[in-house]
Image (cartoon, grey):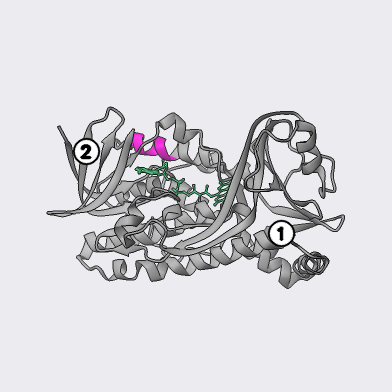
Amino acid sequence: MTQKLRTQVGIVGSGPAGLLLAHLLQRAGIDSIVIDPRTREDIEGTVKAGILESPAVEVLVETGVSTRERVEPMKHDGVEFHFDGQAHRFDFPKLTGKSVYLFPQHEVLKDQIAARIRDGVSPLFGYTAEKVVDGPNGPMIVGKNDTGEAFEIEADFVVGADGSASITREYVTGSKTSGFFREYPFGWYGILVEAPPSSEELIYSRSDDGFVLISTRDEHIQRMYFQCDPNMDVNSVSDEQIWDKLQAGVTSELKRGNIFRKDVLKFRSYVHNSLRKNRVLLAGDAAHTVPPTGAKGLNLAVSDVLWANRALREFYRTGSEHLLDSYQEDAYKRIWKAAHYSYMMTTMLHLAPEASEFDKQRQIAELYMYTQSEAGQKFIAEGYVGWEYGADDWR
Ligand SMILES: Cc1cc2nc3c(=O)[nH]c(=O)nc-3n(C[C@H](O)[C@H](O)[C@H](O)COP(=O)(O)OP(=O)(O)OC[C@H]3O[C@@H](n4cnc5c(N)ncnc54)[C@H](O)[C@@H]3O)c2cc1C
């Protein structure tokens, strides 16, 4: 027997993008169903993003997903760049009047899922979309749940917020990969470690040994990464070698501890070439992927969701599709800025395997240009704290 459901907006994916869209739509009286193959525990255990821009935090707090008391202790007023044996600080409030928040993705997801449950519309966990098709009355999400039962969700609209391996993309362009793509010859080796923070603020380091990022989760758990071969075996380095790689290029002494999680992350830049077909939209990592160096992916997902929310609210208020028609053009503006910023931060701070002495010297000069002039510092800081969101009718 096939389970048949009907809603106004069917949302594929219970990640930050899908959950935020459902929340904003509900505030405007628009129904949705969010589905995800994973369990709640699995989703809430996702270790990914760390840095949220202040406009993204403002959306979460002002729409009642998170509280001001919860986010304020996570505020960070700057980051450091370490290169050429020196440390350079970017003072965000002085340069931009804003800050960022070290609000780990799994904590954001816990707040988002709690908000959906509080509002009486839990996501459907254990539901895998197999495809999106045209039904008699609008698009349909077709799939199976974790008991093996088939389901169909008929909707006025479907939004694919199903991450970088999106199946919804196939409905939009007939292909999962028809877009603009860039691969990088390096990835990140990431660890979680039981130790006190090594630094009050994030450290981005570039040395002749490559890139290192020293980040934090809380007072007891730290997140650190070093540049690696994207095909590297996660078990091929000892803990001692990991600490040597992390310490290289960082001018202050790292606080060591028990490493309890290790992973290798490949990264790439990708922008799908179409974000809408008929009544199906793409948002978040389903629409684009950026390398994590610029801390942009989740923030960008929020931007897409605000544009989609605006277009859908307008449709249900007036029947007009004109904001749906401009969804791709509106969302693309920030998507391409973030794609550039993430590319720039990545190539400026990582060492390409084939880098010549010329490339290395040029890279250091580039870093000095951004750190020694106020204009250069402002440029980096403005991108890092995030540009204002264009769609401001989300309250
Ligand atoms: C190491 C790392 C560090 C990062 N740091 C930052 C940072 O500091 N700041 C930042 O802004 N971003 C950062 N990011 C990026 C950020 O994590 C992503 O951009 C973000 O998760 C995108 O959210 P999303 O909801 O679009 O997609 P996802 O989080 O991928 O969620 C998609 C959801 O869809 C579900 N799904 C998939 N297929 C199906 C299907 N067939 N049917 C139903 N559901 C499906 C998945 O299970 C998942 O729950 C980082 C990423 C990494 C890997």
Q: Which residue was labeled with disc 2? A: 151
Judge: label 1 CB < 8 Å from ligand 1: no
Question: Which mark, by number, is residue 258?
Answer: none
Query: Where in the figure is residue 256, as x and y percent of width and height?
Result: 78, 32
Judge from the rendering whether residue 38 lies leftward or rightward of residue 389; answer left or right.
Answer: left
**Crowd class of label 1 (few under 14; some 14 to 19; many from 20; radius 10 Å):** some
Element marked by disc 2: strand
Q: Nearer the viewer, residue 210 or 22?
A: 210
Magenta span: 112-118
* Magenta span includes 116: yes
Q: Which residue was labeled with disc 1? A: 352
Judge from the rendering whether residue 44 lies leftward or rightward of residue 100; answer left or right.
Answer: left
Quarter of the image for the C terminus: give it.
bottom left
Q: What amino acid is at disc 2?
A: Phe
Q: CA distance from mark 1 to mark 2?
A: 47 Å
Query: Where in the figure is residue 166, as x and y percent of width and height?
Result: 39, 50
Total numbered labels placed on residues in the image: 2
- Which residue is at a point 49% across and 66% down the rendered structure image? 334
Tell us which disc is closer to us: 1 or 2. 1
Q: Is residue 49 visible?
A: yes
Q: Nearer the viewer, residue 197 or 61?
A: 197
Q: Quarter of the image holding residue 71?
A: top right
Query: Where in the figure is residue 201, as x and y percent of width and height?
Result: 72, 47
Q: Are marks 1 and 2 in contact (CB under 8 Å)?
A: no
As drawn, 338 above or below 105: below
- Which residue is at a point 60% across and 45% down the rendered structure image? 265
Element marked by disc 1: loop
As drawn, 356 above or below 44: below
Q: What amino acid is at disc 1?
A: Ala
- Which residue is at a point 60% across and 64% down the rendered structure image? 341
